[in-house]
Image (cartoon, grey):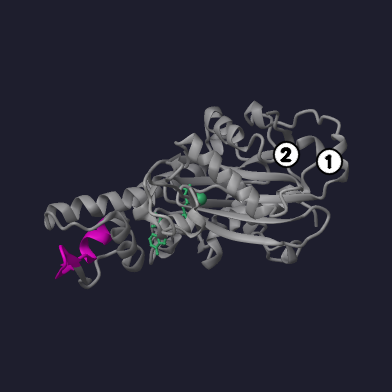
Amino acid sequence: MTTTLTEKKTTSAPDRAIEAAPPSRSSLTRTRVLVGFDLGTNTSCVLAGPAGSKDITVSKIIPTLVGYAREGLVDGIIEGNAKILYGEDAQNHRLQLRVVAPLENGIIAHRDAAADFVRRVRAVADPTGNAEVRAVIGVPANAEDSAREDIRACATGVFDRVLLIPEPFLAALGFRDDARLGQAGYVDPVKNSLFIDIGGGTTDVCLVQGYFPTPDDQISFAYAGDKVDQFIEDELQRIYPNNGLSRTTIRQLKEEHSYVGGSRKPIDVKVLIGGKGHTLELGDVIGRACNELLDRVYPALTTLIPRASSDSVAQLLQNIVITGGGSRIKGIDTVLQQRLTADGFESPKVRLAGEDYKRFVAVGALKAARAAREDQWQHLLA
Ligand SMILES: Nc1ncnc2c1ncn2[C@@H]1O[C@H](COP(=O)(O)OP(=O)(O)OP(=O)(O)O)[C@@H](O)[C@H]1O
Ligand SMILES: [Mg+2]
């Protein structure tokens, strides 16, 4: 089944279909590569394949980082004396580089680094460098026009055409099991679902009801994984002053031990502080940090659910999906479901998107690229 991309009239102007220009002579002879691109605050995902086929020839998850070689670096320290490294390579050479995270709170904060990152993504998607590359790029559900403009500016001269689509819609499209469409009992998430995407920079809660979500269908706020890390760091600093734990270590500890709900037995973690071993009790702090996030997510749910029409709300309650890195917090689905039940919502069912959560937006973006009409693509004029 093909996906039809539909927009409600209220969707902001810059992403409406614009008139297609005649294809240039060179685009008639170049092969065309379609790209699904999730540009995340912490992690990006790129899927690509040739137009006119269902093949996926590139599937990569890349930490959204760009590292610039420091002045005076000794020859040979970085392979090939590269001046710019990306993703894991940038992470691994942190000490020798000035590492920039191009996005903050879900949007581009450092344009030059973002442009370098987008160029890298194109090289990954089309190693030949010769193809005509068209990319569907996810944007936060309530991205301002300026945030969309920043993405377009970074993509100009890199991709031949782009289409920006709200991330929760793409997540639903990626999560949809195309093989089960039309089967009795299968509720299509694109048709009727509530997506909760807890990322690094933002949490997006969004009704997905068959068209691109409008501002009324979504609540997005800049409280997500990075703020949880900040909470843990501040609390640990208070309890164990000068503990010297880096943000990276705190994040790893959080990811290993995260949970919501009632407090668990103590989690004693041995860490090296100034080279000496210390045991810290982290269970309480991590639990409070994750519950604080949950307390911000829940009201967004209870605000959006009543906005669904009374015809669709019963089915919607069966189709609440949590995705993004925050979906890995232990117990988050159970606790949200219990709260909704306790508040009187009718038989809610909260599910986790699952292990593959990092890919759903890009999978949806590639499906959208394959379904897009010619007049929906936007030309990027350098
Ligand atoms: N097991 C886990 N427990 C708690 N948090 C986790 C876990 N695994 C990943 N995370 C957190 O999820 C966040 C990253 O999620 P994700 O990859 O969805 O973000 P993103 O798409 O880059 O960000 P955004 O959507 O805000 O642009 C990080 O804060 C990370 O620490
Ligand atoms: Mg994301």
Among all residues in the image, which is located at the extreme front?
75
Residue nearest the viewer, comparing 334 with 2: 2
Q: Is residue 51 visible?
A: yes
Q: Position of residue 49 (x, y in %)?
A: 74, 57
* Quadrant in the rendering for residue 28: top right
The quarter of the picture where the N terminus appears is: bottom right
The quarter of the picture where the C terminus appears is: top right
Please give left or right for residue 302 compared with residue 187 in the image. Answer: left
Relative height, residue 266 to residue 117 (above, below):
below
Residue nearest the viewer, comparing 307 with 235: 235
Q: Is-magenta flag for residue 277?
A: yes
CA gap between label 1 and label 2 equals 9 Å
Q: Position of residue 34 (x, y in %)?
A: 73, 50
Marks 1 and 2, the one that precedes in the sequence: 1
* Quadrant in the rendering for residue 239: bottom left
How many residues crowd around disc 2 within 10 Å: few (fewer than 14), some, or many (20 or more)? many
Q: Position of residue 143 (x, y in %)?
A: 53, 35
At x 34%, y 54%, the residue is 95
Residue nearest the viewer, comparing 9 with 136: 136
Query: Are the residues at dot 1 and dot 2 in contact (C-beta closer than 8 Å)?
Result: yes
The residue range painted magenta reads: 272-288
Please give left or right for residue 265 compared with residue 314 in the image. Answer: left
SS label for mark 1:
helix
Residue nearest the viewer, comparing 21 with 158: 158
How many residues crowd around disc 1 within 10 Å: few (fewer than 14), some, or many (20 or more)? some
Q: Position of residue 101 (x, y in %)?
A: 43, 45
- Which residue position is annotated with label 1? 27
At x 82%, y 50%, the residue is 31
Three-letter amino acid code of the residue under disc 1: Ser
Please give left or right for residue 296 compared with residue 32 in the image. Answer: left
- Which residue position is annotated with label 2? 160
